[in-house]
Image (cartoon, grey):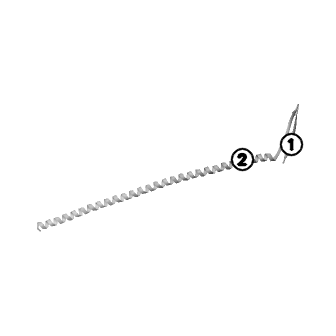
Amino acid sequence: MDTQNLEKAAIKIQSWWRGNTVRRTLLHAALRAWVIQCWWRSMQAKMLEQRRRLALRLYTCQEWAVVKVQAQVRMWQARRRFLQARQAACIIQSHWRWHTSQTRGLIRGRYEVKASRLELDIEILLT
């Protein structure tokens, strides 16, 4: 073989080697980029899940606060109604007691103290 054919063969081998090296380098770079992209997507999914959980926790806290406030208001209203009913019952009872004491029977009487003796005149009326 002459030198010109050897040079052509050497050039072909070198170009083949460089092509393989470049393709391997590009393949490694593409694989590294793919790994980084996969990692980034997983991080984005984790951050999204964290934000979702935080939003859910905040919503739950707000809902419990609303439920507690509603329960307190309902309890206050029920207590107010109970106190009004109790006051009305006390008023009714006091009027009833007064009425029954007035209508049950009357004790009328008078007394006089004369010298050393007591004169007592009692009249009981039952109706």
Label number found at residue 112: none
Give the residue displayed 17% in from the left and 65% down from the top: 11
Amino acid under disc 1? Glu
Q: What percent of the width, then of the height, locates residue 124? A: 85, 44
Q: Is residue 72 left or right of residue 36?
A: right
Q: Tag count in the figure?
A: 2
Q: Secondary structure at mark 2?
A: helix
Q: Secondary structure at mark 1?
A: strand
Q: Is residue 46 left or right of residue 13?
A: right
The residue that label 1 is drawn on is: 123
Q: What percent of the width, then of the height, locates residue 24? A: 26, 62
The residue that label 2 is drawn on is: 91
**Relative to residue 70, is residue 11 depicted above or below?**
below
Q: Residue furthest left?
A: 2
User: Is 105 or 4 nearer to us in this picture?
Assistant: 105
Q: What percent of the width, then of the height, locates residue 46? A: 41, 56
Give the residue displayed 48% in from the left and 55% down from the top: 56
User: Is 2 or 112 nearer to us in this picture?
Assistant: 112
Q: Is residue 111 left or right of residue 91?
A: right
Give the residue displayed 66% in from the left and 50% down from the top: 82
**Relative to residue 43, is residue 104 depicted above or below?**
above
